Image (cartoon, grey):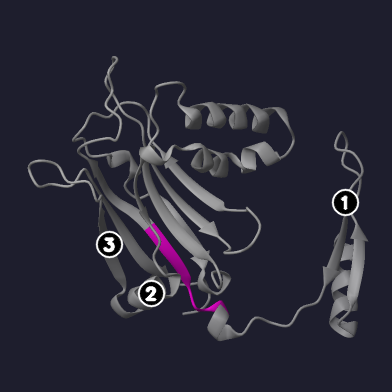
Amino acid sequence: MRAQAAALVAVLTGCGGTSSVTFPLTPHRGPPPIATVESLPAIPREELCAGHLVVEIDRLLVRKYPRISTTPPFRYLPLVAGVLSLPGGVDEDDVTLVAGKQVYRMGDRVRVFEGRLLLDRPVYRLRGLVFEVHLAENHSTIVPLWMTYTNVASQAAQALPGPTSGAIDVGAQIIRMLDKDDIMLTWTPPLDDLVQLARQLGQVRYRLVTPAVLPDGTHAAELDLIVRMKPDDGCH
């Protein structure tokens, strides 16, 4: 295999063309794939070293959930999602889902979310994409859907040799099936603005508050996000 790889590198280096490689058969996994290897021009250093844009949950406090729990244990399921999508493209959202257990009361700070990343991607890979942040409640009037999908995906991943399309699409399915009344806030910041501010200031904190205001003047929920740039390895 090493000799085959070395020969392939030599061919690509010398001719700048395309070559196909057939991988050896792996027992119990069926016919092997055929990988087409193509030489590409180097990514310009200024793009490669532009860094990663990182969006991290810093703090979440929910004073009032959209649906009042009327049955024991009177607890709620918070959910935060970061969604990358291509405007006008096919329905292929890339969803990062952060979901809590049904243990929170109104007014509780959701500490387990702190430090979780909603986005970590090279800047040059973000061109043309739209980023959204959703804060929602997954109410339990019927079945906590995120728990159902997560369990199914976990079982599928254990039973099969590789990831399944069902497991990959779990986050997108959960977002699609949330009722609009469950969503406490949605934020769609221009990615270019996030990158520019993070470069200028090192890191910034955005405090997002719900439009809903309680009788005491406080907002129903507050979500703090830290936006920062992460340098690429070898670009110092």
Disc nearer the start of the sequence (3/2)? 2
The residue shown at (9%, 41%) is: 215
The residue shown at (61%, 85%) is: 44
Position of 198 compared to 7: left or right?
A: left
- Crowding at dot 2, Cα within 10 Å, few <14 / some 14-19 / many 20+, comes out as few
Specify the segment rendered in magenta: 48-55
| Horizontal and vertical percent position of residue 177 | 51, 37
Position of 126 compared to 24: left or right?
A: left
| Horizontal and vertical percent position of residue 218 | 13, 46
**Residue furthest toward the left?**
216
- Crowding at dot 3, Cα within 10 Å, few <14 / some 14-19 / many 20+, comes out as few
- The numbered mark at residue 193 is 2
In three-dimensional space, the C-alpha distance between marks 1 and 3, rounded to whole angstroms, equals 45 Å
Position of 105 compared to 92: left or right?
A: left
Disc nearer the start of the sequence (1/3)? 1
Near-viewer residue (89 or 57): 89
The residue shown at (33%, 75%) is: 197
In three-dimensional space, the C-alpha distance between marks 3 and 2, rounded to whole angstroms, equals 12 Å
- The numbered mark at residue 33 is 1
Magenta stretch: includes residue 53: yes
- The numbered mark at residue 206 is 3
- As shown in the figure, which amino acid type bears the numbered disc 3? Tyr
- The numbered mark at residue 140 is none
